[in-house]
Amino acid sequence: MAKSLRSKWKRKMRAIRRQKNAPKELDKLKKILSSSTIKDVVMSEENCQIKSMPIKPPVSKPKKSEQDADLEMEVEMKRDKKTMMDENGQFPVWMNGRKIKKMTKKKKKGKVGKRKLLAW
């Protein structure tokens, strides 16, 4: 369980919120410990480090040189705007199954068209 998109999003946002609020919580903790009557607690900078996962910076693509540009193949995927299919009859990867099913039904319905009636 707990693998739905909603729970993944919630978990991600909780981690971000935890990271954002960590310095405030640390300041509150230091303030409480300094004002309390407990004096045997030692607060040093080593003990008060915040453990958090660093946010990954966006990956930048390396700059291409002229040699790399010559080796690169120029491939353009051409899609039909109406059916969203490419020249091989494939739907895009990002399209979900329900949408694909709907589009194929629409395509089959369009092929049937009008039938000629026989006149006796």
Image: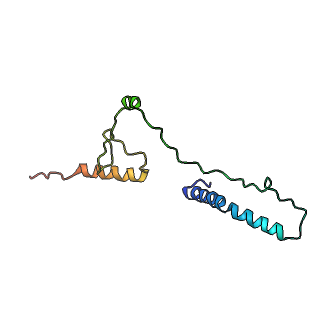
Q: Quadrant of residue 23?
A: bottom right
Q: Is residue 38 left or right of residue 87?
A: right
The x and y percentages for residue 19 are 65, 58
Q: Is residue 57 above or below residue 44?
A: above
Query: Which residue is located at x 64 percent, y 50 percent?
Result: 54
Which of 120 and 52 lies nearest the eye of the viewer? 52
The x and y percentages for residue 79 are 31, 45
The x and y percentages for residue 24 are 70, 65
The x and y percentages for residue 103 are 34, 51
Query: Which residue is located at x 83 percent, y 67 percent?
Result: 34
Q: Is residue 81 left or right of residue 34?
A: left
Which of 75 and 108 lies nearest the eye of the viewer? 75
Furthest-left residue in this view: 120
Q: How is the image coloured?
A: rainbow
Q: Is residue 34 above or below residue 1?
A: below
Q: Quadrant of the N terminus?
A: bottom right
Which of 65 and 89 lies nearest the eye of the viewer? 65
Furthest-right residue in this view: 40
Query: Which residue is located at x 75 percent, y 67 percent?
Result: 28
